[in-house]
Image (cartoon, rainbow, N blue to C red):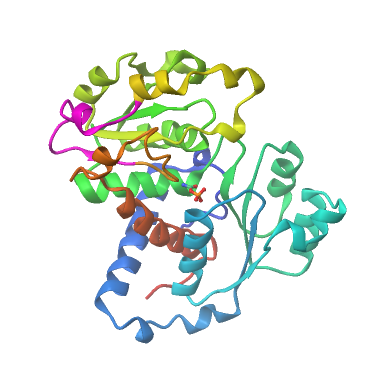
């Protein structure tokens, strides 16, 4: 029997061999799509498999790339839609919503949600594969996979890459998943953030107080979105002009960054905050490559958890 992951709740359970198998399938699907007439790519056997897509928090890239991925594989997809058109608006809980949707018989569940320990434990009990599309402030495994895949494709290897994550680390599930995944693949991770957004375990990895020092060290720089919706009341006193002056990435600052490096961002970008227009125009920008890679990584994760035969 071929080895494959059964679910993807976090990067914690991924081994390096799982990650490279996911990369291989993603590359295969991406190449097949670019070379062949897409209408001739047939996964007719997949038609009977149905994905339930439940996004309880806003999303553009993740939700739509799961939709694209399901389409490319010829899987059926049922989307939960807007909260207002569902019984969540009548007070049904997220856990009951998940239970009811699972009672309808999907073959795989894709889910994004906020901080909700009841949903966390419910998902672990489900009999079908579950793919975490971003949960709370701790986990976004498919984003970390597509980030790692982008580094691998663009720089040829993850081994000995030095990845600098900048900004709102403590509220960023992307940061937590990347900090967990990238070292398993041989990359070093460092953070550069103001004290108020430093993660709790910041002593366990390198951190830079000065962005230019961090840029001189890095081969990959990854600023993160400032997550205003997750900030508590006291955060309102944060001076954003000061933050931008110290941590905003500009073309001038990118002069300290190696010419062979790459600039990434999980999106959505607050233009003028994490990155300004001059930084976005830099030839090292790979943000849209990340988005494209996200479709194929998610297709590969579907192939894994459903154990699809791609040949
Ligand atoms: N990177 C990411 O999760 O973007 P979305 O919130 O648009 O899905």
Could you tell me which quadrant the C terminus lies in? bottom left
200 sits to left or right of 216? right
260 sits to left or right of 31? left
Q: Is residue 263 above or below residue 62?
A: above
274 sits to left or right of 259? right
Residue closer to the observer: 254 or 124: 254
Predominant secondary structure, magenta span: loop
Magenta residues, as a range?
A: 248-264
- Residue 221 rendering spot, x and y as whole percentages: 29, 33
Q: Is residue 171 above or below residue 158?
A: above
- Residue 205 rendering spot, x and y as whole percentages: 39, 19
Residue drawn 44% across and 13% down?
203
Is residue 254 magenta-colored? yes
Is residue 204 magenta-colored? no
- Residue 144 rendering spot, x and y as whole percentages: 43, 43
162 sits to left or right of 6? left
Residue drawn 50% across and 62% down?
64
Residue drawn 37% across and 82% down?
41
């Amino acid at each position: 029997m071929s080895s494959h992951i059964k679910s993807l709740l976090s990067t914690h359970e991924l081994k390096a061999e799982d990650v490279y198998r996911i990369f291989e399938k993603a590359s295969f699907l991406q190449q097949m799509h670019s070379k062949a007439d897409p209408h001739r790519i047939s996964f007719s056997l997949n038609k009977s498999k149905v994905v339930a897509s439940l996004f309880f928090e806003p999303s553009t890239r993740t939700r739509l790339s799961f939709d694209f991925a399901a389409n490319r594989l010829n899987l059926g997809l049922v989307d939960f839609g807007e909260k207002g058109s569902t019984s969540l608006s009548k007070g049904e809980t997220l856990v009951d919503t998940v239970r009811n949707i699972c009672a309808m018989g999907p073959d795989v569940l894709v889910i994004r949600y906020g901080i909700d320990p009841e949903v966390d434990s419910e998902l672990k009990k489900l009999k079908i594969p579950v793919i975490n599309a971003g949960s709370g402030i701790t986990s976004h495994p498919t984003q970390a996979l597509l980030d790692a895949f982008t580094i691998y494709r663009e720089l040829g290897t993850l081994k000995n890459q030095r990845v600098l994550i900048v900004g709102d680390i403590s509220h960023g599930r992307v940061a937590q998943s990347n900090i967990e995944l990238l070292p398993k693949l041989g990359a070093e991770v460092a953070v550069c953030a103001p004290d108020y957004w430093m993660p709790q375990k910041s002593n366990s990895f390198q951190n830079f107080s000065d962005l230019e020092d961090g840029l001189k060290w890095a081969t990959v720089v990854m600023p993160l979105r400032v997550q205003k919706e997750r900030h508590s009341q006291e955060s309102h006193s944060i001076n954003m002009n000061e933050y931008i002056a110290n941590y905003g990435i500009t073309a001038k600052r990118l002069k300290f960054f190696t010419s062979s490096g790459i600039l990434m961002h999980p999106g959505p970008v607050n233009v003028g905050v994490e990155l300004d227009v001059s930084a976005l125009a830099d030839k090292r920008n790979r943000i849209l490559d990340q988005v494209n890679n996200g479709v194929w990584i998610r297709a590969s994760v579907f192939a894994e958890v459903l154990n699809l035969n791609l040949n």
